[in-house]
Image (cartoon, helix red, strand yellow):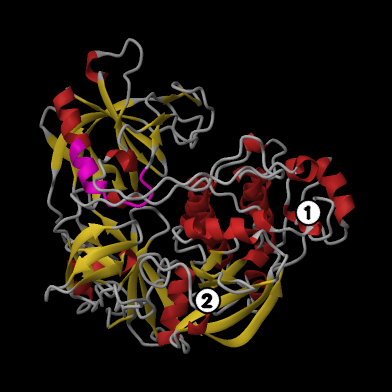
Amino acid sequence: MSERLLEDVFIKRSQQKKKTSPLNFKERLFILTKEKISYYDYDPEKMKKKGLKGSVDVEKIKGVENVLPEENAPADRMFPFQIIYDEGPLYVFAKNDEVRRQWIHKLKQVVRFNNDLIQKYHPCFWADGIWLCCQQEVKQALGCRVLETPNGGFTNKGSRRKSRKPLPPTPQEEKSSRPLPPQPPPREEGPSAGMTVIAEYEYTPMTEQDLQLQKGEEYTILEMVDTNWWRAADKYGNEGYIPSNYVVEAGNGLERFDWYCKNMNRSQAENLLRTENKDGGFLVRDSSKAGKYTVSLFTKGGGDAPGSCRHYNICTTTQGQYYLAERHNFSSIPDLITYHQHNSAGMVCRLKYIVSNRRCAPSTAGLGYGVWEIDPRHLTFIKELGNGQFGVVKYGKWQGQHDVAIKMIKEGSMSEDDFIEEAKVMMKLRHENLVQLYGVCTKQRPIYIVTEFLSNGCLLTYLREDLNHPSPVLLLEMCKDVSEGMAYLESQQYIHRDLAARNCLVDSNGTVKVTDFGLSRYVLDDEYTSSAGSKFPVRWSPPEVLLYCKFSSKSDIWAFGVLMWEVYTLGRMPYERLNNTEIVEKVSSGLRLYRPQLANERIYSIMTTCWSDKPEERPTFQELVVTVQDLLYELQ
C-alpha cells in the first residue's frame, strides 16, 4: 500500500456537480498518499474509518488554495481550502489554520510537477450557480485572482524565460478574445533536485544535449526545464535532456508494469489483444469510470473459434482491498495480477501472456530539447498523403528513422510570420489526443510544418471506408477522444476554429487525435475566412459565427456536436441537401441536424446541447468529457 503522507478528519462540502444537487456538509476522513487523496465515511464515536466515498488522483490536481469563509460561517467551517481539479473545486474545512496550512503545503509539494497548474483561482466559493467573488456564472470560468507566486503557487528560481506578448486580435475574433495559451511553467530547480524516475520507454538522443534512456533503468532529475523536457542524470553520471512523458516517478504505482496500459479504451484493448491472438493474453487499463481499473483478457476457449475478449472490473472492498471475479482479496493490484497469472479463480482462463502497448513510445514535444527549427536536409519525403487548405501533406522520415508528416505550405496561403511566432508556443501543447507539432522549417520557401504521423489517416475517411458495423462503444470512444483533446485546448484558452472529422486523425491503435488547431487564424484566403466564402466551414459553424464571425470555445462546442453527428452517420455530409446560403438562413432560424440512425436518444441529446442558440447555454468540453465517460461506463 502507498505510504500515507497525511491523515485528518475534515468537513467536506458536497460538490454539486449538477445544478439540482443538494448542498450539504459531512464529516469525512481524508487520507493523502503520493498517488491520490481519498475520503471515507467516518464513525466519530468509534474513531473508525468506514467505506470509501471518493478520491482524486494527485496527477489531476491543478491547484490548492485557501477559500474565504462564507458569511456568518459556523465555528467548524472557519478554515476552508479548495482542491482544484477537472471536475471542479473540492471544498474542505480544516479544524484550525495550522492544520489547513499543513495540508496546503504538503499538497503543493505532491502536485508540484503536475501539468497545467493554474495561474489564477477563485478566492470565494461557487454557490447557487455563481462565483461569489467575481459573479461569473460558468463553473469552469478562469479564476479572477492571480496567484502571488505563479505555477500553481510555487516560487520559481532562476527563471530566464521572457514574457511573450499575445498576438493582436483579428477581425474574426470577439473583442474580448483571449490571449495565446500560457507558456509552460518556468524552470524549477529547488523542488526537482534528487527526484528518482524510471524509464518506461527506450529513448535514443535526437540531439547532442539529450540523454539516452534504457527502459526500466533509474534516473535522477536535475532540473525541470519545462513541462515537456527535464534534465536528468543516469547511474554513471551522464547528464542530458529527456522527454518527461518517457519516465515515471519511482514507486509511482502501476506505470512500472508492462501489463498496465493507462490511456487505452475498450475498443483499443480488444484490437490489441486480437492482433496478438494469444489465449490468455491480457492487459490492465483505466476504466471509463474515473479511479477504476479493468482487466481485458483474450481467450480461445468456450467454443469461440476466432477467440473473444472478456473485460473484468477490478473491484474494491470497504477495507480498500482489490478483487476480480471471486473474492480473493489483495492489498494491491500487482498482487492481484500475480495471483491470477497462476489461478483463473472465476475468470474464463488465467492471465497467461502480458500484452503491452508500450512498444510504441509516445510522441515528444519537438525532436529534441529546444529544437523547433528543423533542418530540411534531415527530412526524407516518402509519399504524398493528401492536399489540404495549406498545401501538400507528405509522409516522411526525420533523420531516416522517425515517422513524420510534413505540410508544405503554399506561398501566400497563410500569414507566415505570425504563424512562425506562435509555432513556438504550439509546440508546448502536448496531449495524447492532439497531433503533436514537432517543429517547422522556415529558412526556405515553402515553409514546412512537421508533425506526428498517424498511420490510419483522416477520421472522415476512416469513418467512410474502414469501419464495418462499428459497436456503440467504439463510436462513443471516438467522440471521447476528441472531447478530451478539446478539453485540454479549452484549459489552455485555445480556440480551434475549424473542428471537424476532416481535421482529426487516427493512429494505429484507433486513437483519434485533433489536428490543425488554431491554423485557420493564419489563413489569408478570403474564401476561407469570410463566412460568405465557399471554403468557410459553414456546416460546422453556430449562428454567432455565421452572422457575426464571433469565435470562442463555445463555437468549438457547436462544431463538436456536428463532429459527433459525422461519427454516428459514418462520415455523411452535414445538411447534405442544402447549399451554404441556405444553411446560414435555416440554422439561424433554428434548423438542426436530424438524429442519426446509429445514435440513440441519449447520444443525440448530447449533440443537441452543443447546438443551443445561446453560447452560454452550451456545455464546456470538460463537462462533455464527464458526460461521455459516464455513458461509456454504462455501455460497458
Q: How many marks?
A: 2
**Circle 1: is it few (<14), some (14-19), or many (20+) Cα within 10 Å?**
many
At 15% from the left and 54% from the top, the residue drawn is 2
Give the quarter of the figure containing the N terminus. Answer: bottom left
Give, as a three-letter code, the residue at label 2.
Phe
SS at circle 2: loop
Magenta extent: 105-117
- Of all residues, the one furthest to the top in this rendering is 72
At 47% from the left and 47% from the top, the residue drawn is 164
**Circle 2: is it few (<14), some (14-19), or many (20+) Cα within 10 Å?**
many
The correct choice, above or below, for 198 with respect to 536 in the image is below
Provide the residue designation for mark 1.
538
The quarter holding residue 46 reads: top left
- On the question of residue 631 being in view, the answer is no
The one nearer the camera, 418 or 212, is: 418
Provide the residue designation for mark 2.
453
Left or right: residue 525 compared with residue 243: right
The one nearer the camera, 260 or 63, is: 63
